Image (cartoon, rainbow, N blue to C red):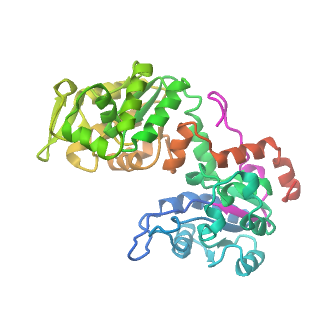
């Protein structure tokens, strides 16, 4: 990641002439799968990567699609046959699929592609090499990368959801081939980069159950001065409350059962160093036999489970958001799946939608909440990659992004248009 205040620079599809070139595009089509039937339960990621594939085909490229589904040993580790059929439905034109990755059948199919055709190779994680995380120069020497690289002219990475990983299909080709970002990758990096050099005030809204991830983000954005305030809710907010006071046996037990004892200590340290910029709920809503009951934090501890933020907190958070220049939200502020405890999350998301700020949703459950609240269309940037987005905002290494920025610095783009091959 570049230091705050510096824009990411990387080559995109605008920098290459793909007509009649064989283009390998790595996408993230990893989807929820019904373990009983193998059916795809949500095709959102397939739809998100379709525009890049469609553009390549429309411009006359011979498109080879590389993707993964699940991990070895997991029940959703399966072939990409259904993904290819779903992609065909989304694109509206034929898509070929082959049960091979780098063997003779796959290589023959790649060589036989005509301009404008699309071929989906088998789940790349069926190849054992793909499951090793190593530096790009080592991944470039794998059989997977060497065998496929000799068959293609250009490599396009559009797999933002896996951009925090360093596997052969993600980082190896950048060592051997002209490499550019696909449209989804481009949109994600440009959108999330707005959080690196934000318009002020910059506000982070962090909730949900991934407390460790949220604390990493807080440590990064407050430690580097990238955020002005952090508003907390959900289990993140409860962790900060537990760092300050007794929140009641059932609520503390929930945190400890999830292994968050260390996170409570980290939250306490953060409050000592950045307490003036971390906002903890003023009041909460508890579940009183299925009915919502609001109590002030001064009334804690409680023997009832905390399920939402209260009205006073909603007002304070909403007022802060309305005055913001940039707002980044990751994780809901309560159990929004239950209507009685959705108000806090929905109202804060509505404040984001009504704000003039550049607003970012970090993927996952907060996106589902924004959709349920009816405000998803009014959020400026909605990320598709939960883990990758968290890694980006936490300032962690992003191997795929490093490969793309390296490609820019190598000035490959001028060679791309003249040769279409390795400079």
User: What residue is shown at x 65% (from left), y 60% (from top)?
Assistant: 26
**Which residue reaches farthest left?**
289
User: What residue is shown at x 52% (from left), y 44% (from top)?
Assistant: 389
Expressed as whole percent of the image width and height from the top left, the position of residue 358 reads: 50, 33
Q: Nearer the viewer, residue 55 or 138?
A: 138
Magenta highlight: main SS = loop
Q: Give the range drawn in magenta.
A: 1-26
- The quarter holding residue 8 reads top right
Please identify the quadrant where the N terminus is shown: top right
Height in image: 350 above or below 162? above
Height in image: 359 above or below 403? above
Expressed as whole percent of the image width and height from the top left, the position of residue 386 reads: 48, 49
Q: Which of 272 and 28 is in front in this view?
A: 272
Assess whether residue 204 is covered by the magenta stretch: no
Query: Can the viewer see residue 307?
Result: no
Expressed as whole percent of the image width and height from the top left, the position of residue 180 reads: 72, 52
Query: Can the viewer see residue 304?
Result: yes
User: What residue is shown at x 31% (from left), y 25% (from top)?
Assistant: 316
Q: In this view, does 262 lie to the left or right of 177?
A: left
Assess whether residue 15 is covered by the magenta stretch: yes
Q: Is residue 374 left or right of residue 74?
A: left
Q: In this view, does 209 lie to the left or right of 154?
A: left
Number of dots carrying numbers: 0
Height in image: 225 above or below 393? above
Height in image: 130 above or below 221? below
Expressed as whole percent of the image width and height from the top left, the position of residue 349 reads: 36, 38
Q: In this view, does 308 lie to the left or right of 94?
A: left
């Amino acid at each position: 990641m570049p230091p705050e205040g510096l824009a990411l620079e990387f080559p995109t599809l605008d920098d290459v002439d793909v007509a009649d070139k064989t283009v390998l595009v790595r996408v993230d089509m990893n989807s929820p799968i019904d373990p009983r039937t193998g059916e795809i339960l949500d095709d959102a990621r397939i739809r998100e990567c379709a525009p890049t594939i469609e553009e390549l085909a429309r411009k006359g490229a011979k498109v080879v699609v590389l993707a993964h589904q699940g991990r070895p040993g997991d029940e959703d580790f399966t072939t990409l046959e259904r993904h290819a059929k779903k992609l065909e439905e989304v694109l509206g034109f034929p898509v070929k699929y082959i049960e091979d990755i780098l063997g003779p059948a796959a290589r023959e199919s790649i060589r036989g592609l005509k301009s404008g055709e699309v071929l989906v190779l088998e789940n790349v994680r069926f190849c054992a090499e793909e499951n090793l995380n190593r530096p790009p120069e080592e991944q470039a020497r794998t059989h997977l990368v060497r065998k496929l690289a000799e068959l293609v002219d250009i490599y396009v990475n559009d797999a933002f959801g896996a951009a925090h990983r360093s596997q052969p299909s993600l980082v190896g080709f950048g060592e051997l081939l002209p490499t550019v970002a696909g449209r989804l990758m481009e949109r994600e990096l440009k959108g999330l980069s707005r959080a690196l050099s934000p318009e002020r005030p910059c506000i982070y809204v962090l909730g949900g159950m991934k407390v460790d991830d949220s604390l990493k983000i807080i440590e990064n954005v407050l430690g580097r001065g990238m955020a002005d305030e952090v508003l907390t809710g959900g289990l993140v907010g409860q962790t900060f409350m537990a760092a300050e006071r007794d929140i009641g046996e059932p609520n503390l037990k929930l945190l400890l059962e999830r292994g968050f004892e260390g996170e409570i200590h980290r939250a306490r340290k953060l409050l000592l160093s950045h307490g003036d910029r971390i906002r903890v709920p003023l009041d909460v809503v508890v579940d009183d036999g299925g009915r919502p009951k609001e109590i002030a934090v001064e009334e804690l501890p409680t023997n009832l489970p905390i399920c939402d933020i209260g009205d006073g907190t909603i007002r304070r958070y909403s007022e802060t958001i309305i005055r913001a220049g940039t707002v980044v939200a990751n994780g809901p502020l309560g159990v929004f799946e239950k209507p009685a405890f959705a108000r806090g999350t929905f109202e804060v998301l509505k404040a984001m939608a009504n704000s003039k700020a550049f607003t970012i949703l970090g993927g996952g459950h907060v996106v589902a909440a924004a959709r349920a609240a009816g405000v998803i269309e009014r959020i400026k940037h909605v990320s598709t990659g939960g883990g990758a987005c968290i890694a980006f905002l936490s300032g962690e290494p992003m191997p795929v992004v490093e490969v793309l920025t390296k490609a820019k610095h190598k000035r490959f783009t001028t060679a791309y248009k003249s040769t279409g091959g390795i400079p």
